[in-house]
Image: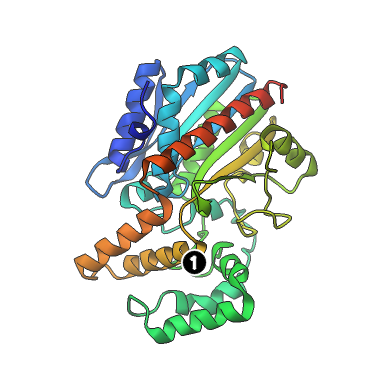
Amino acid sequence: MIGVVEAFSPSYALARRKFLQGCVAAGLTVDTHPHPLKGRDGEDLAMDVAYDGPADARQLLLVTSACHGVEGHCGSGVQVFALQDTEWREKAHAAGVGVLYVHALNPHGFSYGRRVTHENVDLNRNFMDFAQPLPVNAAYAELHPLLLPKAWPPSPKNQAEIDSWIAARGVAAYQAAISGGQYQFDDGLFFGGKAPTWSNRTLRQVLRTHAQQAKRLAWIDLHTGLGPNGHGERIFAGRDDAAAYARANAWWGGETAVTSIYDGSSTSALLTGLNWGVIYDECPQAEYTGIALEYGTEPILEVMGALRADHWLHKHPEAAPELADAVQTRVRDAFYTDTDAWKGQVISQARQAMFQAVDGLSGKA
C-alpha cells in the first residue's frame, strides 16, 4: 500500500504515472482519452478513467480530480491512495458499489499549473446551454480592467482602486463578482466559454460509456482553494433540490452540515455552469447525490491575487522568466499546500467521505 505522502505528486506527468501504476496493481483496465495537445514538458495528456466494481453495479460512485487543473495535485493524491487502499476497496466491493475514477478532468491545466483549460475556460463554469443567451455578470465587467492591468505587479493606484471597490461592497461581493462565472471576457478570470470545451465533451463521453447502468449515482469532485487550510468543506453539488440536499446531509453531514451555495452557508459564491449539470443531461435514469470536497489553502484574497497574476501572465508571454516563475509558484501555493500535514488531512477527510458515499448508496446512511 502506498503511503499518504507518496500518493501525491509535484507534476502532472508523475501523478498520471502513479495513477496508471495504481490501476495496474489493482487489476483495473484504464480507458484513456488523449488530449489534443502536449503538456508543458512535452508529455502526453489524457483524461484517464478506471472502473472498480461489478460490471452490473446499479450503485455508482464517481471520484474526479483536476476539474481546475492545478488543483489536481490534491485530487490525484486521493485517487492514487484509494487505488491501493485495501480496506476501502473491500468496503465498496462488499456493498456492490462500483467506483469510477476520472483522473484529470482538465489535464492541460494540471500540466501547466493553471486552473483553466487550454481554451482559457474555467471548466466548472462551462456546463451551460450555449444555445440560450448567456448570463451577463455586470459586476465582473466593472472589475475586469482593474483585475488585469497593463503591468504586473499592480501599481499602487490599481491596488487602491481594488481596495476601494472592496471597501464599498465587501469581500464577499468581490469574491462573488469574480468567481461567479462570466461569459463576456475570454481573457478574463472565471470565463465560462462560448461552447463546450474538450473536457466537457470528453466527460460526457465517459458518462455515456460507464454510467448508464447506474440507478443511484454519487459524485465526489475534489477541489482546493477555499476555506481554512486543510479543512475539507463538503459543498452540495446539485440542483437546488430539497430532497437531494437532505440526502447529501444524511450521507455526509455528520457533525458539520453539508454547505450550499443556495443558502449562503458555503465559502463558495453562487456559481453558474457547474459541472454537476452533466449528470442530469447524461444520466437522467439515476438518482443523483453529490458534493464538491473543497480543501482550504490560503486566504481568499491571496487566492484571487494568484489567479489575477496567472491570467496576466497568460496575456503577457514576454514577461521576464523570474516574474513568470514567481507567478507560477504563487498559483501552485494557492491551490496546493505541499506539506505532509496537509496531505494527511486531505486523505483522511476524502477517505471518510468515500466510505460515507458507499453507505449512502447502499442504503446504510
Asked whether residue 103 appears in the rendered view, the answer is no
The image quarter in which residue 21 lies: top left
Q: Residue furthest right?
A: 242
Task: Please tell me which residue is depicted at 42% across the width and 28% down the height of the picture.
Answer: 81
Read off the residue under disc 1: 301
Callout 1 secondary element? helix
Q: Residue furthest left?
A: 321
Name the quadrant of the N terminus: top left
Q: Give the side of residue 245 with respect to residue 165, left or right.
A: right
Count how many numbered circles sit on residues in the image. Answer: 1
Asked whether residue 113 appears in the rendered view, the answer is yes
Q: Give the side of residue 337 with respect to residue 101, left or right.
A: left
The image quarter in which residue 340 lies: top left
Is 8 drawn above or below residue 127 in the view shown?
above
Name the quadrant of the C terminus: top right
Specify the amino acid type for callout 1: Leu
Q: Residue furthest front?
A: 341
Report the front residue among 126 and 314: 314
Q: Give the side of residue 36 with respect to residue 298, left or right.
A: left
Task: Please tell me which residue is depicted at 45% across the width and 64% down the height of the picture.
Answer: 302
Q: Position of residue 152 (x, y in %)?
A: 33, 75
Task: Please tell me which residue is depicted at 28% across the width and 46% down the height of the picture.
Answer: 39
Q: Position of residue 195 (x, y in %)?
A: 51, 55
Q: Position of residue 213 (x, y in %)?
A: 62, 22
Report the front residue among 346 and 275: 346
Q: Position of residue 19 (x, y in %)?
A: 36, 30
Is 70 drawn above or below residue 104 in the view shown?
below
